[in-house]
Each structure stands twice: as structure tokens, then as C-alpha cells.
Image: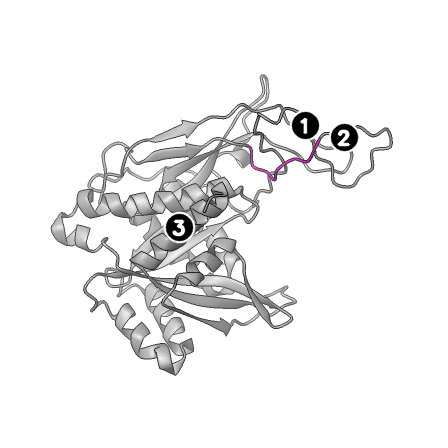
Amino acid sequence: MGRDEKEKKEESSSMEAAVAAAAQKQDADASDSDESSSSDDDDELILEGVLVRNPDASDSSSDSEEEEDMKPPAKKQKQSKDKKNSKSSKRGGPEIVPMDFIFCDMDEKFFHGIKNLLASSSPAYVATASPLSDLMIKNVSVGTVISTEYEYPPGQERDMDYEGVVYGFASILNVTTYKENDAIKALKKMCLSKCPENRKKELEIVLSGKTKRPAGFYFQSRMVNLPLEIVEVLHKQLIKDMDWAVDNAGGGVEQRKSLDFGAFVRIAPSYREKNTPYYKYFDDELLANHAEFTYEFELPKTFGMDETPYCTVIVMTKTGHRAAVKTLIQLVNGSG
């Protein structure tokens, strides 16, 4: 499967990876504790702060051949905001890096970054991270990667640590199209073996491929401190991918039908504090709130873990998924 030039929806977000800066404060006895600053001009929105990078999420050394028959939506367009020069915090503080986030098609160069983010998100994916990453990259018509463009100061040498890094991704894999893949088989088996008896028949139907519209495993992972605006765009881009693929993806009518998802199964990383369940990614809670049903189960600890990991299986319809994304948009924009 190939494609001409990358004509994907190119809706990029340009802002510095960060948490919102606090008000500027001058103090002669500046301590080594948290320091943040912002302009006194309330009319200018500046998002700046600490960019925490996954040192293992590097890109591969070479690009794969471009996909020909799965042309993505409209070209991505960078949305630029005025930015201030960031400075490293004082002795012992973290570095603040100016960064443009871009939303890219799935590509072979992102393999290692996707694999490492997926494996580190939950023990549920450790054994299958590599083959699942391969499938997501091949499934180029439905999937988005968050990467970056770094603005090098004059005279500074290029640093590959900042280029081609995967800060997040989202993708959907058809459970029927890839039913013979061992990784998909393993996920189905795990979900069904842990499913409560009163929901097992329903889940079996969803994962059987016998539904009127196909079901897909819903994957997303990212660095947890990404700005909310970036998370919002990631979810919107995935919806645009699916809508575009139904009408335009190569491979004929059957191929397009296979991308017209009616249901999704999300295996979401979660944990517990004092017997109260929490999600690793806040947007998974929004998905769960609009799901047909959810159930949680315990995972075995991996090396170095102090606490028992969990995951929550979220089973939702297309309607529920889009309602959850609408809620996310309202939350990020402070409306509704």
C-alpha cells in the first residue's frame, strides 16, 4: 500500500511545550524551588514551561517508502503564536525549550517513538508494542503522530534529540482486518478473559467482526504533560482521519467500509489510590463517561514497579466517542 505526496490534514499547533507560567515576580533571594514567569500583558497568551522528553522515543534512521493508495485529508497548516524567548531556570532548574508541535502522518521513522510510548503507557502493551506499532504505521489512513519542529538559535548545531521525537499518537486498528495478527489476537484474548460474565457476550459480538459496522482497537499514548490544546487537536485529527478515509481511502469500497468504524475498544492505563480508580490520561475518563460499558482488571507488576498497575477496558460506539470528544473540546475551551 502506498501514497503520493503527503496531503494529510495539516492542522498543527504551534506553542511551547509547557505548563502555563505563573505571574512574573522579582525576588532578590530567589530559591531553587519552582520558578515561572509571564508577561504582565493580559492580552498575550504565552504557554511556556518545561518540556519533558522521553529519552527512548527516538525516530528510526531512515524513512520508509511513501504510501500511494491511502491519501490523507487536507494539508496540515501550522498555527503560529507569538512567543517569548525562554530561558533555563536558575541553578538546578529544568530547561525551557521553545518548540512547535506538528501533527504528522504515520511513518516508519516514528516506529521507535510509538513503540516506546505504547509500551511505557501500560504493562498491557509491553509484549505487543512492537507488532502493534508496525500495524499502526501501515494503517496510514487513520492515525496521527505528534512530533515537533525545534527553532534553533543562530549558531546552534542541530540536535537530533529534538527532531523526529514522538510526543504522542492516536490510531484505530480494525479487529477483523487484522484478526490473524498475533498482537490483535492477544488483545482480544486478554479483554475477553477479564470481561465480567454479564458483558462477555456483548464484547464477543463487538470483537467478532460480525457487527454491521466494524469495530476497532483504539490506541492513544502521549507524554502526560502536553498542553490540553495539543490533546484536543490530537482527538479532532483522529476523527478527521476516519471521516476522510470512509470516502477517500484507497483499496476500493471494501477498504473504505473497513474504516467506517461503529464501535471502539480502548484498553486504557489506570491505577488505584486508596481503592479509588484513576486514569493515566484524563481524556480516557471522558471516553469512559460516554461508553456503553467499562470494566477494570489488575495487571502483573513489571520490574521496578512499587504499585499494582491496572487497566480499564472502555467499549464505546461511534456516537459515544464523538460525544466524548465534544466534551473534551468544551473542557479545553472553557465552554458549555
The residue lying toward the viewer, choosing from 87 and 199, is 199
Q: Residue furthest top?
A: 154
Q: Residue at x 38, y 38 (%)?
A: 104
Circle 3/circle 2 CB separation < 8 Å:
no
Chain-order first, disc 1 or disc 3:
1
Label tally: 3
Q: How is the image coloured?
A: one colour
The residue lying toward the viewer, choosing from 52 and 321, is 321
Q: CA distance from mark 3 to mark 2?
A: 37 Å
Q: Characterize the local packing of mark 1: few (<14), some (14-19) or many (20 or more) Cα atoms within 10 angstroms.
A: few
Q: Quadrant of residue 135?
A: bottom left
What secondary structure do most residues of the magenta stretch adopt? loop
| Residues in magenta, as a range | 16-23
Q: CA distance from mark 2 to mark 1?
A: 15 Å
The numbered mark at residue 325 is 3
State the SS at label 2: loop
The residue lying toward the viewer, choosing from 278 and 147, is 278
Q: Which residue is mark 2?
A: 25
Query: Of the residues shown, which amino acid type is indicated by label 1?
Result: Lys
Q: Residue furthest bottom?
A: 197
Residue 102 x %, y %? 43, 34
The numbered mark at residue 19 is none
Residue 147 x %, y %? 46, 38
Query: Of the residues shown, which amino acid type is indicated by label 3?
Result: Val
State the SS at label 1: loop
Residue 332 x %, y %? 49, 44
Residue 200 is left or right of residue 95, and the answer is left
Q: Characterize the local packing of mark 3: few (<14), some (14-19) or many (20 or more) Cα atoms within 10 angstroms.
A: many
Circle 1/circle 3 CB separation < 8 Å:
no
Q: Which residue is mark 1?
A: 87
Chain-order first, disc 2 or disc 1:
2
